Amino acid sequence: MPVLATLATAAGLSVLRRLRDAGVYEELERRAARLEQGLAPLGVVQRVGAMLTLFFGTGPVTDFARASAADTSRYAEYFRHMLDRGVYVPPSQYEAMFVSLAHGDEEIDRTVEAAVELAGA
């Protein structure tokens, strides 16, 4: 067990060192904005930094009533569609997507293409 704790600590410190670079946040913002723009035709995308949520409804979700009014059946269809195309999104529209530096332009493009395919159906 001590080896795993050491490995986890080393990994955590490495991430924290990387996050000192302001350019990391600028890049995360750019990537998340691209994903937000690509998902917008499907519904309401709400984003804070590199964290975003997609609701199948109208208007911003500002409270529980607005969130409850979103179309969970449509989200379930979206989830299955994306999963069938190898894109893993949260299984519930009440959960957030997190964009990371591991999500490059290629992954974002593939995600948007699959989403647009559903929007056109």
Image: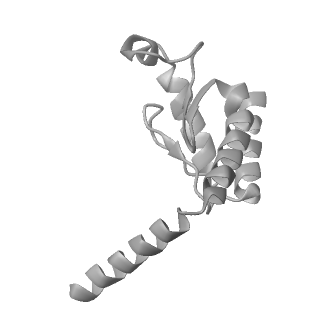
Q: Position of residue 78 (x, y in %)?
A: 59, 35
Q: Position of residue 56 (x, y in %)?
A: 57, 22
Residue at 55% x, 17% y is: 60
55 relative position to 119: left or right: left
40 relative position to 77: left or right: right
Above or below, 62 against 1 in this view is above
Residue 121 seen in this snapshot = no
Q: Position of residue 82 (x, y in %)?
A: 62, 45
Looking at the image, which is closer to me, 118 or 47?
A: 47
Residue at 61% x, 50% y is: 84
Q: Position of residue 77 (x, y in %)?
A: 57, 33
Residue at 53% x, 63% y is: 20
Q: How is the image coloured?
A: one colour
Above or below, 45 against 5 in this view is above
Give the quadrant of the N terminus: bottom left
Q: As drawn, which residue projects farthest toward the left?
A: 1
Above or below, 27 against 77 in this view is below
Residue 6 seen in this snapshot = yes
17 relative position to 103: left or right: left
Residue at 53% x, 62% y is: 19
Give the quadrant of the C terminus: top right
Q: What count of labels does the image hold?
A: 0
